[in-house]
Image (cartoon, helix red, strand yellow):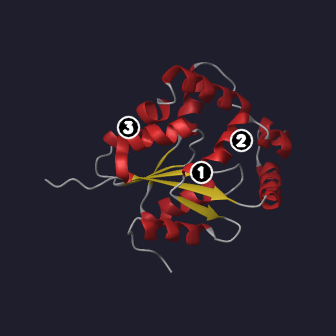
Amino acid sequence: MTTTKKLIVLLSGPIAVGKTSLREKLISDFDFHTIQSSTYLKDLATTRKIDATRHNLQELGDSLDRESNFRWIVDNVALPLISSNPSYSRWIIDAVRKPEQVEHFRDAFGDSVLHVHLTSTEEILESRYNARKKSEDSSDRNIPYNEVTSHPNEQCSRSLITLANIVIDTSKLSPLEAANHICKRLKINTIN
C-alpha cells in the first residue's frame, strides 16, 4: 500500500486580507480540506459556556497557547482531523497566529508544510474590514478597525511574514491567482 504525501498549507496575515476567500478557492478548485481553529474554539467556548465573540475566542486561544505551549492547534485540531481522514492529502489551515504554532506544524509535518503569508495595503484592509462588518450579524461588528489591528494577536499574526515560505499581496492577485501561485509551488496542476 502506498501512502500519499500530505500537503499542509498554513495561512497567516492580517484581518480582512483574504484568508477565507483563498481557503475557499483551494477547497473548491484544488481539493484541499480545511482545518479551522475557529471551529474548535467555538465548540470549546460552547462547552465552557463562553459567549463566542471575537474577543472571547482570542482570549480562549491565548489561554490554550499558554496551557499547551502553543501546541493545541497541532495536537488537538490538526493531527486528529488528518489522522481520521487518511485519504485526504491536501490540507489548509486558515489561520496561524503565532511563530510557535508555525514551528510546531513544521516539527509535526516536516517539509509537507508550506507557510503562506497574505498581505495588502492598510487602506485596502480597512476598506475590506468595514465592508465585511456591515454584512456580519454579530456583536463584533461594532469594533473599529484600529482597535482590532492593535490587538497583540493581530500584531503577532502580521509579524509572521518573516517566517513565510511565500508572501502573496492580495491587492494584486485574485483568490484564484493566489491559489494558482500556491499550487505551482506545490507542483499541483493550476487552473487558467
Q: Which mark is residue 155?
A: 2
Identity of the residue drawn at 50% across and 25% down: 69
The residue pinned by badge 3 equals: 79
Nearest to the observer: residue 48 or residue 168: 168
* In front: label 2 or label 3: 2
First in sequence, mark 3 or 1: give its number: 3
Q: Could you give the CA–CA distance between mark 1 and mark 2, rounded to whole angstroms?
A: 13 Å
* In front: label 3 or label 1: 1
Callout 3 touching callout 1 (CB < 8 Å):
no
Where is residue 21? Give x, y as percent.
61, 59
Relative vertical location of residue 192 with respect to residue 113 in this rendering, above or below: below
Nearest to the observer: residue 187 or residue 22: 187
Categorize mark 3 by other alpha carbons within 10 Å: few (<14), some (14-19), many (20+). Answer: some
Q: To which quarter of the image does residue 114 belong?
A: bottom left
Identity of the residue drawn at 67% across and 47% down: 158
Q: To which quarter of the image does residue 96 belong?
A: top right
First in sequence, mark 1 or 2: give its number: 2
**What amino acid is at disc 3?**
Leu
Identity of the residue drawn at 67% across and 58% down: 119
Relative vertical location of residue 54 with respect to residue 5 in this rendering, above or below: above
The residue pinned by badge 1 equals: 162
Where is residue 107? Give x, y as percent.
38, 40
Residue 84 in sight here: no
Please tell me how many numbered marks the rendered image carries. 3
First in sequence, mark 2 or 3: give its number: 3
Identity of the residue drawn at 57% across and 70% down: 176
